[in-house]
Image: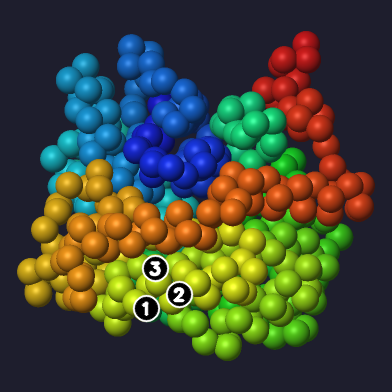
């Protein structure tokens, strides 16, 4: 049976450095498929979709709300041609009811241990409109190595530099942050993968550079320390979301190859200043993630925050506008308060104001968002700062003998070996 698995494109934010990372959802889904399913994968961000290919079924994996309308259009085209289409992924779960109008079947929840039944139903012409597995998560032990071989490795370079591969060591999140939908998607409990299964997958990844996409690594200190201890011999270089603010954990993270972290900067406190310094003291770079438009922010607060970011020596900063994504407390509050004025999902990219802020007009918040980007990067562009960040990992790799040229990278993949022949 032939499955065409598709990851739709979306409109990237203007003025920011554009590069493509190998998507995570599709390779995780591919690992959960029955062996008889032959997967052909298209990442529309790097390749064109061939609609007239002879396939049995089409799957569309959607991560972002900003992708969903494009995903619907792709599905409509395939269904017009008589193909069966199913949806999965984060944005599918957030917009399940609307997505059903464009799909033969909608798969909600995590795929491990569930896809055999799905494809049996398809073979027997008994495909259900909805497969809802969100209430009960699969056994975390079922999560095995993702099938990264479906990716075209050559496509994931930026100016000759290999981009990171995405990887996860846990699911779920015990934190329930105001603008976040993770507790709805992955549950409110921290579900760590067994360390031996994590190491097993890490050993299968040829790429030395990783983005550990877990919502937060700072959820269980003992598990976190054990994870880093086991990663040390692998000599990977990785970035992640927040790490525990503990000297022992930070030291182990640095030994394990921590390259940089995404650190939320929510105020101008000494704690944040010292937090960034502690990362730097351990040789770990910091990309600040800054959310603009919260109800406790005035125009002056935002300007002071941008000035503060320049003082604390962040290596990079990523500014986003508060966005009322479905199934978040933000969405519930703003919907009740009738503050959402834009429901075009193409604009739900965290760079456009789609709601009425509390202390300013939407237009002024949009201007301050641009002001933040322009001010932080006035002396060095985002691309220049990113280049310095990339060079820092190259230096780490050269010191421990793991650096590879682009040709050496490609030669270690099936695609590269085909080129060499």
Classify residue 61 by image quadrant: top left
Q: Position of residue 243 (x, y in %)?
A: 63, 74
Classify residue 53 by image quadrant: top left
Q: Which mark is residue 301?
A: 1
Q: Position of residue 221 (x, y in %)?
A: 65, 83
Which of disc 2 and disc 3 is earlier in sequence? 3
Residue at the farthest front position: 379
Which quadrant would the N terminus be assigned to in this image?
Answer: top left
Q: Position of residue 410 (x, y in %)?
A: 74, 27
Q: Which residue is mark 3?
A: 291
**CB-based contact (under 8 Å), mark 1 and mark 2:** yes
Q: Which residue is mark 2?
A: 305
Image side of residue 23 versus residue 250, left or right = left
Answer above or below: position of 374 versus 402.
Answer: below
Few, some or many C-alpha atoms within 10 Å of disc 2 (few <14, some 14-19, many ≥20)? many
Frontmost residue, 15 versus 123: 15
At 29% from the left edge and 77% from the top edge, which residue is drawn?
Answer: 298
Q: Position of residue 341 (x, y in %)?
A: 11, 58
Frontmost residue, 404 versus 136: 404
Few, some or many C-alpha atoms within 10 Å of disc 3 (few <14, some 14-19, many ≥20)? many
């Amino acid at each position: 049976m032939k499955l065409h698995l598709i990851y739709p494109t979306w409109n990237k934010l203007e003025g920011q450095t554009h590069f493509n990372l190998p998507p995570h959802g599709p390779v995780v889904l591919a690992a959960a498929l029955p062996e008889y399913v032959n997967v052909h994968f298209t990442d529309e961000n790097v390749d064109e979709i061939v609609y007239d290919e002879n396939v049995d079924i089409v799957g569309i994996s959607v991560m972002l709300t900003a992708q969903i309308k494009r995903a619907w259009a792709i599905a409509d085209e395939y269904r017009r041609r008589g193909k069966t289409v199913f949806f999965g992924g984060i944005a599918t779960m957030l917009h399940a009811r609307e997505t059903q109008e464009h799909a033969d079947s909608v798969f909600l929840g995590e795929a491990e241990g569930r896809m055999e039944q799905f494809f049996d139903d398809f073979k027997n012409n008994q495909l259900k409109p909805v497969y809802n597995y969100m209430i009960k998560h699969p056994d975390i032990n079922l999560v095995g190595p993702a099938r990264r071989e479906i990716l075209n490795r050559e496509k994931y370079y930026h100016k000759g530099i290999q981009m990171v591969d995405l990887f996860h060591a846990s699911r779920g999140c015990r934190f329930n942050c105001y603008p976040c939908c993770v507790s709805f998607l992955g549950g409110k409990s921290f579900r760590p993968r067994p360390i031996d299964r994590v190491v097993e997958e890490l050993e299968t990844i040829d790429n030395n550079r990783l983005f550990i996409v877990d919502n937060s690594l700072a959820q269980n200190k003992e598990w976190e320390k054990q994870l880093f201890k086991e990663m040390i011999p692998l000599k990977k270089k990785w970035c992640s979301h927040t790490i525990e603010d503990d000297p022992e954990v930070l030291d182990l993270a640095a030994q394990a190859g921590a390259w940089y972290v995404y650190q939320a900067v929510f105020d101008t406190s000494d704690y944040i200043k010292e937090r960034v310094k502690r990362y730097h003291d351990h040789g770990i770079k910091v990309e600040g993630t800054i959310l603009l438009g919260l109800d406790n922010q005035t125009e002056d607060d935002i300007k002071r925050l941008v000035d503060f970011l320049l003082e604390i020596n962040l290596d990079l900063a990523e500014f986003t506008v508060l966005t009322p994504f479905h199934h978040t407390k933000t969405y519930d509050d703003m919907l009740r308060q009738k503050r959402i004025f834009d429901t075009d999902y193409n604009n739900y990219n965290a760079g456009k104001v789609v709601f009425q802020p509390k202390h300013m007009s939407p237009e002024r918040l949009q201007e301050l968002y641009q002001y933040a980007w322009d001010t932080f990067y006035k002396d060095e562009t985002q691309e220049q700062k990113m280049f310095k960040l990339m060079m820092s990992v190259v230096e780490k790799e050269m010191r421990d003998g793991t650096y590879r040229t682009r040709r050496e990278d490609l030669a270690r993949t099936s695609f590269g070996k085909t080129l060499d022949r």
